[in-house]
Image (tube, rainbow, N blue to C red):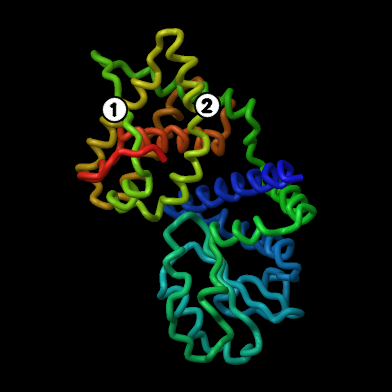
Amino acid sequence: MAMLRKNLFDNIKAKLTFLSMLITNGSSLNLLELNIHSENFYASLFNLIFDIHLQNVNTTTHNVASIDLIDNENKIFVQVISNAKKTKVENTLKKEILKSYKDYTLLFIFLGSNDNISLIGKSYKNPHNIKFDSSKNIYNLKTILSHIMNLETEKLEDISNFINKEIKFPIEREKLDSDLTKVINTLSLEQFSDIETPNTLPFQVEEKIEFNKLRPRYDFIKDYDAYMGILAKKYNEFDRVGKNSSFVILKSLKSEYRHLKELYSDSVQLFDKIIENTKEKVRESNNIDDVSEEMLDFCVWIIIVDAFLKCQIFENPEGYKYAIT
């Protein structure tokens, strides 16, 4: 039973993380269609987690400005947003129309993988005294997963089945192996006059994230760390036949980082640009016609996180002690 719970939760976590990153990347390019579809997705997900009855306000007669989901039976309002800013919360709390719904509790669901954890527990201006507790009523990927983790096994099965139907991402190992091989093969075609062994000393991941001001990508880096074993195996397969793919890719990413560092002072923008440029290199190849856009994202994210962990992109904190995490 313990193994079943772990497998169910790992599947839920992987697919919600994947959805979170898709939303984040889409928002950065002002592609918001997925955000709109996610309102209905999170309504159904929260109904499963908390046994409530949220509906999209567009399907009800209670069309309230700045509110996306509503449960009239349990008197709950929800706003689903990707903009992780305190002002966004307060702008909703000050809406005049909320005065008519003082017996409703207001919840916020933050989409994407931005640094919204810092908004939990803060003090907010609440001029109409709406029922809102920032320590309990703000949800993001981390807090949603913490609620899911403590559910009964049967409930985990229901949520896992729902997510499998909604998020059609082929995360199965065979498909990942196949597509990751194609992406590695494409990225390792770049030619260098010399192949130097990268410095891969282990280090404290959290410290490097903080040092490089990448806290908004903390969950992203930590979650994709779980796939490093799969990538290492793939690299070894290429290296055994003399292709030196891991060294070529790492050196290419290091060169890309040094170039983009001169153009982007914001670390998060720099991190995202490295990902986008790497995906573009792969797209230009004729070898990945059968690799979906979702799988391309997933494979490139794994490779970029590996380069970060191997200190080929972004700076090492000065003076810290190397330690295996």
Q: Image check: 176 left or right of 214?
A: right
Q: Which residue corresponds to the image point at 47% horizontal and 54% vertical from the top-left?
A: 113
Q: Is residue 155 above or below residue 208?
A: below
Quadrant for the C terminus in the image: top left
Camera-nearest residue between 30 and 143: 143
Q: Nearer the viewer, residue 78 or 313?
A: 313
Query: Residue 199 — which label?
Result: 1
Q: Residue at x 30, y 38 (%)?
A: 322
Q: Where residue 49 sits: x, y (%)?
A: 70, 62
User: Residue at 27% of width from left, 42% of height from top?
Assistant: 321
Query: Looking at the image, is mark 1 or mark 2 nearer the viewer?
Result: 1
Q: Residue 5 vs residue 321: left or right?
A: right
The x, y position of residue 289, in whole percent, is 55, 25
Residue beneath label 2, please? 180
In the image: residue 102, left or right of residue 89:
right
Q: In the image, which disc is placed on residue 279?
A: none
Q: Secondary structure at mark 2?
A: helix
